[in-house]
Image (cartoon, rainbow, N blue to C red):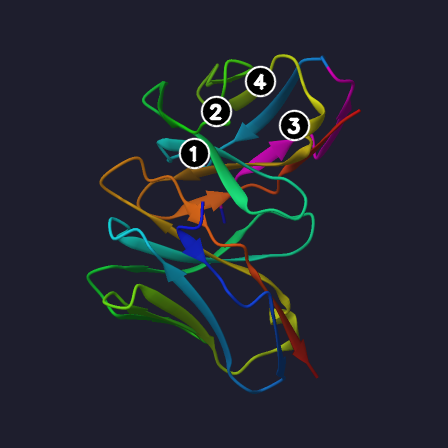
Amino acid sequence: EPEVTQTPSHQVTQMGQEVILRCVPISNHLYFYWYRQILGQKVEFLVSFYNNEISEKSEIFDDQFSVERPDGSNFTLKIRSTKLEDSAMYFCASRAEGTQYFGPGTRLLVL
Amino acid sequence: DQQVKQNSPSLSVQEGRISILNCDYTNSMFDYFLWYKKYPAEGPTFLISISSIKDKNEDGRFTVFLNKSAKHLSLHIVPSQPGDSAVYFCAATDMEYGNKLVFGAGTILRVKS
C-alpha cells in the first residue's frame, strides 16, 4: 500500500541553524501539506501546496518557513533560522481526493 | 482555536464492548470530517471519514455518525480490541476552500482485556 515517507525521523539542531525536512508524498497525489504538533498540543496546520505553489498558509508559517517541490517526488519544508519554539513533530500529508494521508513525522529538537 | 473539540481526554473500555468517541465543531462551513488514530511517535493513521451529505458511514468495526444540526460527530468501535488502544483525533475541513484539516485535541482510548 502506498504511503507517505519522511526523513529524517529525528533532527537535533542548534538555535539559529537552518533545517530541511523532507517528504515523499504518495505518487499520484496532487495536494501536499505540512502540519506540526508541539508536545502536549493539537496537530496544527502549517501550509498547503498545489500546482507548485502555496495555496494556503497559517499564521505560524512566517518568513522563516518555506516549502518546495524540487523534483517530481520530494516535498520539503525549510526553516531558515530555527527557534526553541520550533521544537515539535512535523508531519507531511498528501491527498488525491478528500482524505489526507500522513507520514510518520520528523521529531525536531532545537537546542 | 476551538473550532473542533473533543471534550473527553480519555476513555477506558472493556475488550469486546463498544467504544464511543465524541467530537463537536463550531464552524458551519466544515463539510468533511475524518477520524485518525495515532500511536506515540507516529503519524496520524486515517480510519474513516464522512461527508456532510451523509449521516452515517461504516467500515468494518468502525462507524461514524454525523449530526449536522447539533454539529456533532461520533466514532463507534464495535467490538473494541486491545489493539485499538491509541489516541483518536477528530478532524474537519471545508472542501471548497483550502482543505486544511482542523484537529481536535484527541481522546486517549484504552481497551482493557
- As helix, strand or loop, the secondary structure at mark 1 comes to loop
Q: Identify the residue under disc 3.
A: A86
Q: Amino acid at mark 2?
A: Ser
B103 sits left or right of A41 in the view: left
Q: Are marks 3 and 2 on the same chain?
A: yes
Q: Are marks 2 and 1 on the same chain?
A: yes
Foreground mark, 4 or 1, reads 4
Q: Residue at x 36, y 18 (%)?
A: A52
Q: Is A63 above or below relative to B49?
A: above
Query: CB under 8 Å between callouts 2 and 1?
Result: yes
- As helix, strand or loop, the secondary structure at mark 2 comes to loop
Specify the label residue A78 is tagged with: 4
Q: Residue at x 65, y 13 (%)?
A: A81
Q: Are marks 1 and 3 on the same chain?
A: yes
> For the residue carrying disc 2, how many other residues have a C-alpha within 10 Å: few (<14), some (14-19), or many (20+)?
few
Residue A12 is one of the magenta-drawn residues? yes
Quarter of the image where the C terminus of chain B is located: bottom right
Q: CA distance from mark 4 to mark 1?
A: 21 Å
Q: Identify the residue under disc 2.
A: A73
Residue B54 is one of the magenta-drawn residues? no
Q: Chain of mark 3?
A: A
Specify the label residue A58 is tagged with: none
- As helix, strand or loop, the secondary structure at mark 4 comes to strand
Q: CA distance from mark 2 to mark 1?
A: 7 Å
Q: Which residues are magenta?
A: A2-15
Specify the label residue A27 is tagged with: 1
